[in-house]
Image (cartoon, rainbow, N blue to C red):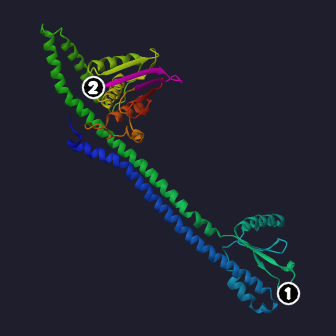
Amino acid sequence: MVNRSENPFMGNASSFYQSKAALKWIALVFSLIIGIASVLYTNSIVEELKEREERSIELWAKTLEYTSDPDNSENLIFIFQEIVTPNNSIPVIVTDANGNPSIFRNIKVDSSKNDKEAMQQILKNELKIMEQEYEPILITGAESNDSSDNQYIYYRNSDLIYRLKYYPYIQLSVIAAFVFFGYVSFSYSRKAEQNQVWVGLAKETAHQLGTPLSSLMAWLEIMKIDDDLKDKEVTKELEKDISKLELITSRFSSIGSVPVLKDENISKLIQSTVNYLQKRTSKKVAINFISKDDLVTADINKPLFDWVIENLCKNAIDAMSGEGEITITLKEGKYGDALIDISDTGKGIPSSKIKEIFQPGFSTKKRGWGLGLTLAKRIIENYHNGKISVKESVINKGTTFRIILKR
């Protein structure tokens, strides 16, 4: 057997898949730092612009108060040209003491319609918005101390500040969308490339198995001719093993092709697999099959489904260190699905590792590629449109895998 430490391919694959999650977290944290920095920087600019606009409105208010004094009438033209008129961005409404609008600037009103009531309603709606943003600025009467001559200036942030305030969020959304579609495209491309590697490796494996398998079949025929060997138990078992090797070769050679699914009796398939495994497993391991419904059927590719059951049982044997009990239970689910539970009395899986066990390269054994559960998941979910998961796992008590097949 090949030891993990002696296998250069295994070391690279394992470290790659184990570090992939860490790289994702690093990228996420880095993205959050950039996003937060962008938002904070933009907000600082917005606050600075708010202060400038507030000072501009205060200057505007003082200008109106100044121009209300008849003694300053000679300066009115200069003041309106240089201070009042240039305000073309900050929405402003001037009201009398009773809150009735008298002057407004930069408020979107349809000037083509001569409807004073509609205009007043628009201005009053704007006043409600302005009251929530800033306190109005008081302009006292120039000729009288009567408060009824007072005026109030209401204002709010300009559209530029609103756009600038939400700009980083829009920018980050666009970047996030771009990154997301880029990641999806990259993942799809990577998976397609991985699939090609898987298919090539599987077909090459099937090709390599063909030569020794043909030789074994020839030796078997010789043993059948020999009167001393043809009825021996070893000859019969060897024939079964050769048939199994043929099945395995067929599995590998068919990878990459769409598997043919047939309506099969699940109970008979599992029982056949259990019978084969029990004779080739240590006597210290008991494999029990409990079928609560012998008539449960589903669309299955027999060679691939047998391989999944074998793989889960072999993993269970490794988890039990070659000594314990495996229980396979078949029953019909609430919605008519076929439920298959495979339980062992092994060491269990830590809760922190359950999400990783179906990833390529994950293995708790000193040897192996860590691909068995990955292939099992692909066979059940991609080919059979089912689901495989860890139903339950308790440290030092055992693990239960559940397979769900739709009928």
Vertical side of 341 occupied by 44: above or below? below
Within the image, what quadrant is residue 84 found in?
A: bottom right
Numbered circle sitting on residue 325: none
Magenta part of the protein: which range? 323-342
Residue 131 drawn at (x, y percent): 74, 68
Which amino acid, mark 2? Ile
Task: Provide the secondary structure element on which disc 2 rests.
Answer: helix
Say whether residue 336 is magenta.
Answer: yes
Position of residue 127 in the picture relative to residue 210 (left or right) = right
Q: How many circles with numbers are drawn on the protein?
A: 2
Residue at 44%, 20% in the rendered image: 330
Vertical side of 82 occupied by 272: above or below? above
Quadrant containing the N terminus in the rendered view: top left
Task: Provide the secondary structure element on which disc 1 rests.
Answer: loop
Which residue is label 2 attached to? Answer: 248
63 or 270, nearer to the observer: 270
Position of residue 384 in the picture relative to residue 303 (left or right) = right
View extreme (top): residue: 227
Residue 42 drawn at (x, y percent): 54, 68
Numbered circle sitting on residue 143: 1
**Label 2 to label 1: alpha-carbon separation:** 104 Å
